[in-house]
Amino acid sequence: MARDWSKLDESDVRVRPGKGTRPRSKRRPAHADAVTAMVVGKDRGRWTCAVDGDPAHLVVAMRARELGRTSVVIGDAVDVVGDTSGAVDTLARIVRVAERGSVLRRTADDTDPFERVVVANAERLLIVCALADPPPRQGFIDRCLVAAYAGGLEPVLCLTKADLAEPDALLAAYADLDFPVVVTRRDDEPAELRGMLAGGVSALVGHSGVGKSTLVNRLVPDAARRTGEVSAVGKGKHTSVTAVALPLPGGGWVVDTPGIRSFGLAHIEPDDIVAAFPEFVAVAEECPPGCGHRGSPEDPDCYLDSVIASGEARPGRLASLRRLLASRAGAEDPGEA
């Protein structure tokens, strides 16, 4: 007998249920019980965090699923939930990453469009450069300065091995930039530098052989043990390609960045550098679109020279600014860290 389809309604249609009947929601847990921590180490999907910035209270955490692929780097201030006791074989979750006050970024080279955040929330960038053995490379220093200015960090130039060569020539090259410079010797304690770094977060960069490891070991006498503690709580052993934050005995942190081999500056625009030179900012806005502010012949219509003509800035400041801009444009050898 044929079925009379005209007498059927939606209640007669069998609907196959989905995999779940619970409606999806965009609401996320408030995590009111979260504790604040600073990221001090990372190893293959596991982050070591100092709860409330206490180097004695380290916990291991994974990134919560709700964060997706949100970047978490050394120096980040994060909210952590779960087991935050720091006991062996416990694992917490990072559920929030606070807005960053500063960022040290780099790209693989000057043509790489993908920027990498190396350190977050550092107050200063300590650029370690030897006066001899190996000889100083001004192009690398300039690139570090560009990265510091663009990322909101205060640059500090640390000249090591002053027992082998005089610092006068290098000091003169950076005299017009008005940033702190510290000169150290292999046979002397870095007391001035220790006082300068106390109480804040400082990132260290430098070429192999310039004495950066010696400085770290003097600033943090138990640096080797501390590095072991940070790496041991992750999945594997800390390697030379991983940054790590180490606590200073008098308070504060130093972030050793042995993995930075070069500073590609593809992510930095000329105006990012000009912003670090207040006397040129307003005039730079009057320059033609696309001006690189490097002057003739690259930018013949650049207005920055008018600031010098009016006596509102020292000629050395403009020369230093344009040297940094040339470094950003690839006119200088980027060098290796």
Image (cartoon, rainbow, N blue to C red):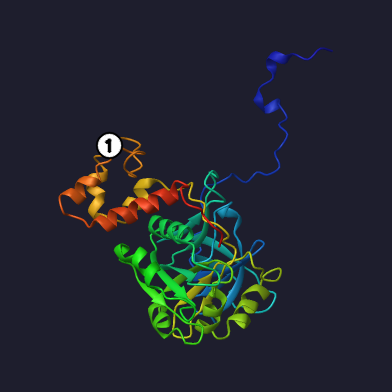
Q: Mark 1 points at which residue?
A: 301
Q: In this view, does 222 lie above or below 124?
A: below
Figure quadrant of the N terminus: top right
**Residue neighbourhood size for the residue with mark 1, other residues' Cα within 10 Å, grouped as few (<14), some (14–19), many (≥20):** some
**Image side of residue 289 versus residue 41, left or right:** left
Asked if residue 64 lies left or right of residue 88, the reply is left
Q: Give the quarter of the figure containing the C terminus.
A: bottom right
Q: Which amino acid does label 1 sit on?
A: Asp
> Which residue lies at the image location 44% right of the left edge and 73% below the top edge?
159
Q: Nearer the viewer, residue 328 or 196?
A: 328
Which residue is the extreme one toward the left? 310
| Looking at the image, residue 179 lies above or below residue 199 | above
Residue visible at 27% across and 36% down in the picture: 301
Q: On the picture, is 201 further left or further right than 24?
A: left
The number of callouts visible is 1
Nearest the eye: 89 or 302: 302
Residue 121: give x, y in percent of width and height: 44, 65
Q: Nearer the viewer, residue 117 or 178?
A: 178
Picture quarter containing residue 193? bottom left
Q: Residue 327 location in percent, x, y?
A: 44, 51
Task: Label 1, secondary structure: give it.
Answer: loop
Left or right of 41? Residue 126 is: left
